[in-house]
Structures are given as C-alpha cells and as structure tokens.
Image (cartoon, helix red, strand yellow):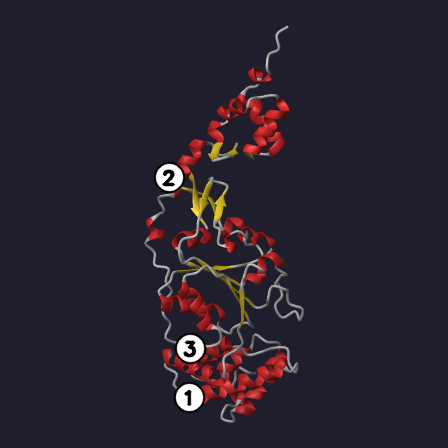
Amino acid sequence: MTYIPFTVKMTEDQITDKLKSLYGTEFTTADIKAFCSMNDIHYNTVTRKLQKYKVSKGKWNLEVTQEAVEKIEKTFNAPSADVTERNLVPDVDNTFVPFGGFKDVKSIIKSKQFYPAFITGLSGNGKTFSVEQACAQLNRELIRVNITIETDEDDLIGGFRLVDGNTVWHNGPVIESLERGAVLLLDEIDLASNKILCLQSILEGKGVFLKKIGRWVKPAAGFNVIATANTKGKGSEDGRFIGTNVLNEAFLERFPVTFEQSYPSIKTEEKMLTLHGASVNVSDEKFIKKLVDWADIIRKTFYDGGIEEIISTRRLVHIVRAYSIFKDKAKAIQVCTNRFDDDTKQSFMELYDKVDAEVNFETNESVE
C-alpha cells in the first residue's frame, strides 16, 4: 500500500483547530515548525493555509484575519481630526511659582530625551501642577492619565470601540503620547495594580506591539514618561494614603530619577497665595502671611509627630478662594477645615486664633 502523507488529508479547519489547541489563537513561526514536525506536515503547506491569519512577519492570529487587519490599519492610519488638531499644550498659569525640583523636571522635558522621572511628595504640594507648567513654558504637549486601582491595559494602550455600529480601534493615552512625541503624565501612580505592567517595554523607550491589530508603535522624538505619587511605590505604612499599593520593583527600577518634593518655603508660599489672591480680587497681604505662618507651624508639628494631619498648599489656596466668596476670614478657614475630624479641626482653628488675633471664630455663626 502506498503511504499517503497526512498533509494531503488535513484541511484548513483541522490545522487551525490543532494549532489553537496547542498554542491558543496566537502563534509564531517556531510554533508552526514544531507543529509540522509533530504531524509530519510541510511548513509551506501549513503557512499557505494560514495566509489570511498572518498579522505580521512570523506571527499569526486566528481571531484577526488579514482582511480585518487591513481594515483596522486604514482606520488606525487615519485618526480623527478631533485628535490630530487638538492642541495638547497646557495653558500657562500666571499663579504658578517654581520651586523644588521644577527646574530639573523642566530640564528633562526640554532635553527631549527619553528619561522617565518619578516625583513623590505629600498631597497638595504641586507635583502635577509643576509638570503641567513645565510643559506649558516649553510649549510641549502633555497627556495626563489619572491612575486608579481599576486602570488596565485597555485604558492605557487602547482597544476596540463601537462607533456608528462599527468596531474600530481607538488609541489609548499611551499610544497617543508615543505617536505625538508628547509627555505622558501618570498621575497618582501608586494607586495602580499590577495591570500597569503593560507599560514595561514603554518605560524602556522601546515602544509597544499592539497585538490586537498586529502593529508596532515606536516612540516619536520627545516622548517621555513622568509619574507622580504620594509614596515611593512602597505603600503607606502610616495609613495616610489608603489605597496606595506596593508597586513592582522592576517597574520602579525603570524610572532613572526620583524627585522628593516637599512643601514650598514660607516666602515662596506667600508669593503663591498672593498671585492666587490677585486672580480672585483678594489683596490682603497680612491675611496671607498669617495663613502661611499658621500652615508652617502645623507642618512642623506634623513632622515632629505631634499631629496626624497637615495643611497643604492646596488647602491654603482653597481658603483664599473661600474668603473671596464669603468675605469672612473665620468662615473661610472653618469651611475649608471641616474635612478634618472634629478634634483636629478645633485644634487648627485654635492655633490660627493665636496666630491672628483679628479673627474670632466664636462670633462666626457657621462655627456653631
């Protein structure tokens, strides 16, 4: 009896079913060669039957046919005018006062080198604002992503979306930043889960392979990644920042530099509040100075372990704006410290009463 090679009998469906059972829906040249060896089939015979599933050199995907790839590529290469024409350069804010590591962060962005940076510091001390204003001053595009525990690859890289009844590929903020050569700001990175490990290759400056559409995206000139966090990615032992997570060590190691940002000096903070006050028609320099002195005493007590709460620069700005609305200093301070527990709020208000004798909380009805 003449031996008939199994190749003749194996149909396209049989080949795809066997490959899927062995390697899943995605496989490579090495997988097919191993399959051919196991089944005594010629490599060229198999690849001819799989031609419509080939998505790139040496890669096949049973769920994405060549026809689908070409359609997606067409959509991918023709981004909407809404994205391409949008100016992503932040506006210059005249209330911004540079301090801390701002000069160094600006130098990194100005160099247009790929050099990821990690900025850590207590809440409300201007970490995100400083990156935005560095980009604004340098006329550089910035794409900001607020990270949460739910942030995953689809949120960051992109995915298929239903548009007018059609399924089309939409870039995520990471891909948009890569292609535009923009600065990618990962805000509150320490809230993330291990789902952000999809950024590993991107943090090496190598770009990313979009496996769903079989396309490799390389970073354009000027692309960079900056992350901000309240912790250093090691979690919060004191419980102040509940929800922060311990980040993967290999992920953190991909940030060459870390800037530790503290609150601004007294003079710098006075200048900040003066500018913010001017923007809302508040020009009470004495009140601003008292606020800054009050916050400085609280912070020193906090660092010494005397209290568990702190007044941030952001909180001081809130008070100035509240004063511009209510025209009442005591009420402005009171409503902006209501977020603290009763004991902390009372101690803060009593301390301010000692710093500024002109403000009397007892006569303010809202306190009662």
Q: Nearer the viewer, residue 151 or 364?
A: 151
Q: Which residue is mark 2?
A: 74
Badge 1, how many Cα within 10 Å: few under 14, some, many 20+?
some
Marks 2 and 1 sit apart, C-alpha to C-alpha, by 59 Å
Looking at the image, tell me whether mark 2 or mark 1 is earlier in sequence order.
Answer: 2
Instruction: Label 3, secondary structure: give it.
Output: loop
- Foreground tag (1 vs 3): 3
Label 2 neighbourhood size at 10 Å, few (<14), some (14-19), many (20+)?
few
Give the residue pinned by disc 1. Answer: 285
- Residue at (52% x, 34% y) in the render: 61
Q: Secondary structure at mark 1?
A: helix
Q: Is residue 3 above or below residue 166?
A: above
Residue 7 percent across, percent down from the top left: 57, 18
Which circle marks residue 97 in the picture?
A: 3
In this view, the residue in front, 336 or 366, is 336
Q: Tell me the kind of residue under disc 3.
A: Val
